[in-house]
Image: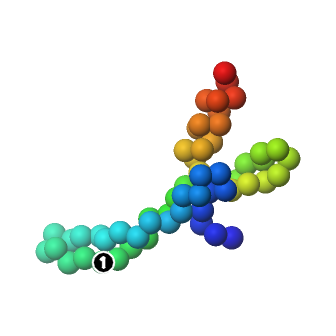
Amino acid sequence: MPQACAICGRGTVTSFSVSHSKIKTKTTQKINLQSKKIGGQKERICTNCIKTLAKNSAK
C-alpha cells in the first residue's frame, strides 16, 4: 500500500533533520493516514481530508 491519500494524493515528504552542529540527516515525514469507508469502499485518507469531508457534509 502506498503512503498517499486516496483523495488529495498527498504523500511522504523528504526533509533534513538539522542538529545543533548543523549536521544534516535525511529523514522522511509520513502523512497521517486513516482508514475510512467512503461510498461503501474502505479508503486510506489523510486527516485533513477527513476534516474537510465532515465540514462539507454538515452543510
Q: Is residue 34 visible?
A: no
Q: Is residue 31 visible?
A: yes
* Residue name at image x 16 percent, y 73 percent: 22
* Residue name at image x 73 percent, y 48 percent: 36
Label 1: element kind:
strand
Indicate the quadrant containing the C terminus: top left, top right, bottom left or bottom right: top right
Whether residue 45 sits left or right of residue 32 in the image: it is: right
Vertical order, 39 against 57 (above or below)? below
Q: Residue 54 placed where, x, y %?
A: 65, 33
Look at mark 1 in the image and give the residue it sits on.
25
Indicate the quadrant containing the N terminus: top left, top right, bottom left or bottom right: bottom right
Q: Residue 6 placed where, x, y %?
A: 67, 56
Q: The residue under label 1 is which amino acid type? A: Thr
Whether residue 36 sits left or right of residue 4 in the image: it is: right
Vertical order, 14 against 5 (above or below)? below
**Which image quadrant for residue 32?**
bottom right
Residue 15 or residue 10, whichever sits in front: 10
Vertical order, 54 against 24 (above or below)? above
Please give the count of numbered marks on the rendered protein: 1
Q: Residue 17 placed where, x, y %?
A: 30, 70
* Residue name at image x 54 percent, y 58 percent: 10
**Which image quadrant for residue 24?**
bottom left
Q: Residue furthest front?
A: 8
Residue 5 or residue 20, whichever sits in front: 5
Q: Residue 58 placed where, x, y %?
A: 67, 24
Q: Residue furthest left?
A: 21
